[in-house]
């Protein structure tokens, strides 16, 4: 009978590759956990109106606080609303870019398929 002793096609080389893949996946998981903790502690500033309105968010886009200069109040409700919205968008964009960069740093060099 041919093929005797072939098993399921998992030779020692394949087992080593599988073990290495699990090791890499564990490294990514541990790194992702540390990254999540770092992102939660970050304070990322978004602003508008030349600093009249500032929005501070965490690295994972959780709002932390809003600072509004007295001069912004004098602009009226509609303009103030636009300034707050613009500052929120600015903070969100910076936070998203930071998260993306950190994830790329985490996965670079690991040669994981799909990353």
Image (cartoon, rainbow, N blue to C red):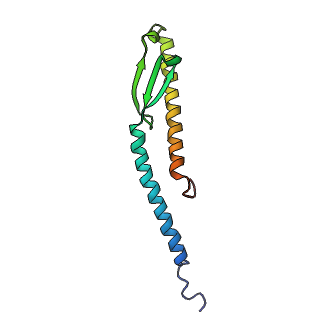
Q: Please determine whether, in this image, residue 14 is positioned above or below residue 96.
A: below
How many marks can you see? Answer: 0
Front one among 29 and 78? 29
Frontmost residue, 59 versus 7: 59
Report the residue at 47% width, 8% height from top: 76
Q: Residue at x 48, y 14 (%)?
A: 80
- Residue at 48% from the left image edge and 20% from the top image edge: 84
Q: Position of residue 114 (x, y in %)?
A: 57, 55
Q: Is residue 86 above or below residue 112?
A: above
Instruction: Choose between 82 and 105: the one closer to the eye.
Output: 105
Residue located farthest toward the bottom when viewing the structure as drawn: 1
Q: Position of residue 24 (x, y in %)?
A: 49, 60
- Asked whether, in this view, residue 13 is left or right of residue 61, the answer is right
Q: Position of residue 27 (x, y in %)?
A: 45, 57
- Give the residue furthest to the right: 2
Does residue 89 sit above or below 106 in this rendering?
A: above
Q: Is residue 40 above or below residue 113?
A: above
Residue drawn at point x = 52 percent, y = 17 percent: 50
- The quadrant of the rendering that contains the N terminus is bottom right
């Amino acid at each position: 009978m041919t093929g005797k002793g072939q098993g399921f096609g998992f030779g020692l080389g394949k087992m080593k590759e599988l073990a290495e893949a699990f090791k890499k996946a564990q490294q990514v998981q541990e790194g992702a956990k540390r990254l999540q903790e770092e992102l939660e502690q970050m304070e990322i500033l978004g602003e508008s109106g030349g600093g009249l309105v500032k929005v501070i968010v965490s690295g994972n886009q959780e709002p932390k606080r809003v600072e509004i200069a007295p001069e912004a109040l004098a602009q009226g409700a509609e303009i103030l609303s636009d300034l707050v919205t613009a500052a929120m968008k600015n903070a969100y964009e910076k936070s998203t870019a930071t998260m993306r960069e950190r994830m790329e740093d985490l996965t670079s060099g690991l040669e994981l398929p799909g990353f």
